[in-house]
Image (tube, coloured by chain):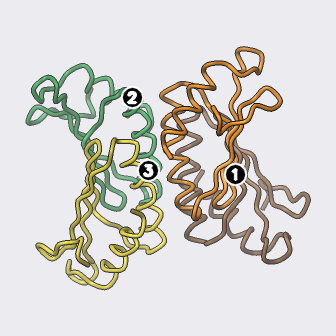
Chain colours: A orange, B yellow, C green, D brown
Amino acid sequence: MSNWTEEHNALKRSFKFQDFSEAFGFLTRVAIEAEKAQHHPEIHNVYNQVSISLSTHDAGNTVTDKDRNLAAAIDKLL
Amino acid sequence: MSNWTEEHNALKRSFKFQDFSEAFGFLTRVAIEAEKAQHHPEIHNVYNQVSISLSTHDAGNTVTDKDRNLAAAIDKLL
Amino acid sequence: MSNWTEEHNALKRSFKFQDFSEAFGFLTRVAIEAEKAQHHPEIHNVYNQVSISLSTHDAGNTVTDKDRNLAAAIDKLL
Amino acid sequence: MSNWTEEHNALKRSFKFQDFSEAFGFLTRVAIEAEKAQHHPEIHNVYNQVSISLSTHDAGNTVTDKDRNLAAAIDKLL
């Protein structure tokens, strides 16, 4: 999981796109993956920048396989 | 406008993506372009396939620069 | 399934929204439901109008419970 | 602009939806409005919660009419 860093019990990754349209097209696909996994990230977006943070609330806000699997699914979108 | 064909007074182009997610990410960006242009295409989607048809109702359903411009904006998304 | 009609071995329903934005917000949610169900409708959109057609290819293009379940999930979005 | 509060030179509003799908359908429409206005908010989302923050970078990160207009456009989506 080299593209993600684990800090404060969450997997985090930042993404930079060409413009807002490309960023939001990506976010739409992230939304689809999140609902398929029934696991929802924390999403932050400003223009062409997206930050995603993954942790598992039901496991006391730690990083679990749910987070690692969703991170891997998100990486595949790129 | 080599990627689009003009038939029955409309500009048409078909697109094939890897899967539904990629197709819908593209459609989200088409939606944004359409609203920016205040000009809306006819969209058809099944799984990884998208067809777009452009014509100008206000001009008696003919192909106008509104259609050519939106087609060019859509091509830039690819 | 009163809102959907079965014709030519497909469940069909048409929707009319206030404008394109409302129609596309709905389509985004349909896309999420479709991917969750791993069952993808035929979608047609022009401005504020959306038509959805559901049939099951793997079952010889007939209407199955996969279609009825996705139709019910789509109805819940309204 | 009663639904938005101005703090730290930004207009802010939080939204709570029934679920993630409803929240993301809303965000898609916000994205369309943002691109139409060529003015992009700071967006934060976790599951059914959305926070939006508006300020104008070109005006030294203060609140301008660009922010007030986009806030009004977002309110109309609800």
Residue under circle 3? B25
Q: Chain of mark 3?
A: B
Q: Nearer the viewer, mark 2 or mark 3?
A: 3
Disc 3 crowd, CA 10 A, few/some/many (<14, 14-19, 20+): many
Residue C70: x %, y % from top left: 33, 28
Q: Nearer the viewer, mark 1 or mark 2?
A: 1
Establish if A47 lies above or below A77.
below
- Which of the 4 image quadrants contains residue C37? top left
Q: Are the residues under badges 1 and 3 in a single subunit?
A: no
- Which of the 4 image quadrants contains residue D75? bottom right
Q: Residue at x 19, y 28 (%)?
A: C56
Residue C60: x %, y % from top left: 9, 26
Q: Residue at x 28, y 41 (%)?
A: B47
Residue A29: x %, y % from top left: 49, 43
Disc 2 crowd, CA 10 A, few/some/many (<14, 14-19, 20+): some
Establish if B2 lies above or below D75.
below
Looking at the rendered structure, the kind of residue marked 1 is: Ile
How far apart marks 1 and 2 lie (CA) works out to 27 Å
Quadrant (top left/top right/bottom left/bottom right) for the N terminus of chain C: top left
Q: Secondary structure at mark 1?
A: strand
How far apart marks 1 and 3 lie (CA) works out to 19 Å
Quadrant (top left/top right/bottom left/bottom right) for the C terminus of chain C: top left
Looking at the rendered structure, the kind of residue marked 3 is: Gly
Residue D56: x %, y % from top left: 78, 71
Q: Secondary structure at mark 3?
A: helix
Q: Nearer the viewer, mark 1 or mark 3?
A: 3
Disc 1 crowd, CA 10 A, few/some/many (<14, 14-19, 20+): many
- Which of the 4 image quadrants contains residue B75? bottom left
Residue D43 — which label?
1
In the image, taking residue C46 as reference, residue A26 lies left or right, namely right
Residue under circle 2? C73
Q: Residue at x 61, y 72 (%)?
A: D38
